[in-house]
Amino acid sequence: MERLHCFPQPFPDELLYSLAVRYHRLSANHSYRRTSQDLFGVYSRTCGSILPCCLGTLSKELAWAYSANELINNFTLFPLYEPFLSEAKRSAARIAMAGDSGTGLKMSLGLTASGFLKHASFRYCESCVTEDSRNCGSAYWHRIHQAMGSCVCPHHGKALRAITFPNGADWRCMLLPGEAVGSQIMETPAASAVDIVSEMQFWALNHPTDVQRLLAGNFLGHRLEEMGFLKSGRIREQALRAFLTSTLLLNPLANEFQEICHSCDWVFTVLRHRERVIQPLKFYFLCWLLKTDLEQLRAFDAQAHTCNKEARKGDDPGATFDHAEVQARRAAFSSSLSMKCHEKPGYMWLYRHDRGWLAEYVSAHPFTRTRPELVDWDARDLALVRELLIARDQILSTQEKPQKITRAALGRKVARSREFLKTPNKFPISTFLMKDMLESDHDYQIRKINWAVRRYLLPEQSSVSVVYRCAGIRVPHVTVEEVLHILSHV
Ligand SMILES: [Zn+2]
């Protein structure tokens, strides 16, 4: 130790403020001002923050026993936020925390806008206080208890308590948990949301790179797909909204959860990446809303980095997958023949991790919509056959002046004539039959002469021209012999 004469050995998951309080006690300083000067070289206003600054100086004061980044990783809540930040924001935030001024840090991480800060308090768990006093010799402030949305201790499942610093003072009076009055921040938790979110955040705080993989692997997208809230890669907003609203109504929650329980609009800004920085609480609460627990987060992660270099593909060159898994996903995708590409199982996974194969498969297997045959054309054809036969009989049996059996004449007497005339190929038997039924000019005139002879009682010696006139024939298609034959036989 070059600069500081002493510094406490950190306890598991200890907050930087807690270390500062214990240093304050060890060095028997009378005021925070002196302690701050020792630790940070300046009067730091952020020592009690979940995202403190001046950590570069502290690292120096500690003779680089911890680098500034190690201080950030181990004693602040930054690892909870980091996976949700772009590379640029991430390094800007680290630079701010290592530097002397943290101005604008909470704003740039979206904390100020989130509305969560007004619920913030110094929180502790009574069971942890008892255990830490016994095991470590002192109670201390746990990082996870201070995270937004931590209302329950992830170790004991008990509702956390918030300390009230005495005489209207703030954290600068340098107290540890249990040293001032504390009040329980919520009723005994009835909803599982607070428990599960607390567990998830504790895991996330200690596994930021795993969370990054979850985000890179579009965990929420997969979950929506599994739950049937995606169609053609798009969110079925109405269905999801109905589902979320009923879940939110059934789970009235306190504290910072109030900020995200009155509406589910925020879910869509999270899912569509419209929020500049996603608040960890929103992400994990949404995981809970989508019926996910910590084991599923872990399992997704385990699945995502099973190492096998055989399947290193797609737009995610860092990810490697088990050959059998890739084959299984390809098989599941390619066996769903009747579905559109985006609706097939595992589309999103393959798009992300196996895009080359996916593109090849899709171009080789263009989707052709197979519409279910709604009309029984065979039955229609047979029905039309019957109608045509009846129509022909009606035309032939009339006592009136004969009408020629034409396509139009038959069509007028059947129900589906329009359909039949437009799509004759759908009525093959009817089409064949109709061709056979159509009457030639000769046959029609024979029929007309027969009718006229009977109708006008024409005698056998009638002249052919009279017969033609009575039958309404101008251009004869019959022979004189045929006319005489009819006259002689009636
Ligand atoms: Zn506890």
Image (cartoon, helix red, strand yellow):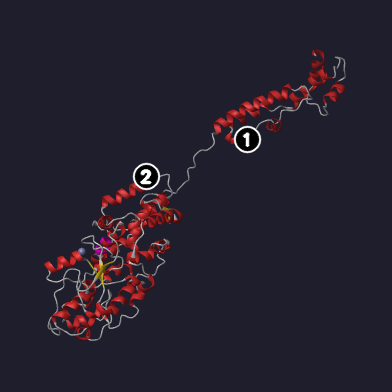
Q: Is the magenta stretch mostly helix, strand or loop?
A: helix
- Disc 1 within 8 angstroms of ligand 1 (CB): no
Q: Which amino acid does label 2 sit on?
A: Ser
- Binning the other alpha carbons within 10 Å of mark 1 as few (below 14), some (14 to 19) or many (20 upward) gives many
The kind of secondary structure element at disc 1 is: helix
Which region shows up in magenta? 199-203
Who comes first in sequence, dot 1 or dot 2?
2
Residue 352 seen in the figure: no
The residue under label 1 is 420
Residue 71, percent across and down? Answer: 21, 75
Number of numbered discs overlaid on the protein picture: 2
Of 439 and 415, which appears nearest the observer?
415
Q: Is residue 306 shown above or below 328?
A: below
- Binning the other alpha carbons within 10 Å of mark 2 as few (below 14), some (14 to 19) or many (20 upward) gives few
Residue 1, percent across and down? Answer: 12, 82
Assess whether residue 220 is covered by the magenta stretch.
no
The kind of secondary structure element at disc 2 is: loop
Residue 370, percent across and down? Answer: 47, 43
Quadrant of ligand 1: it is: bottom left
Residue at coordinates 18% horizontally, 85% vertically from top-left? 30
Dot label at residue 335: 2
Answer with the quarter of the image where residue 316 lies.
bottom left
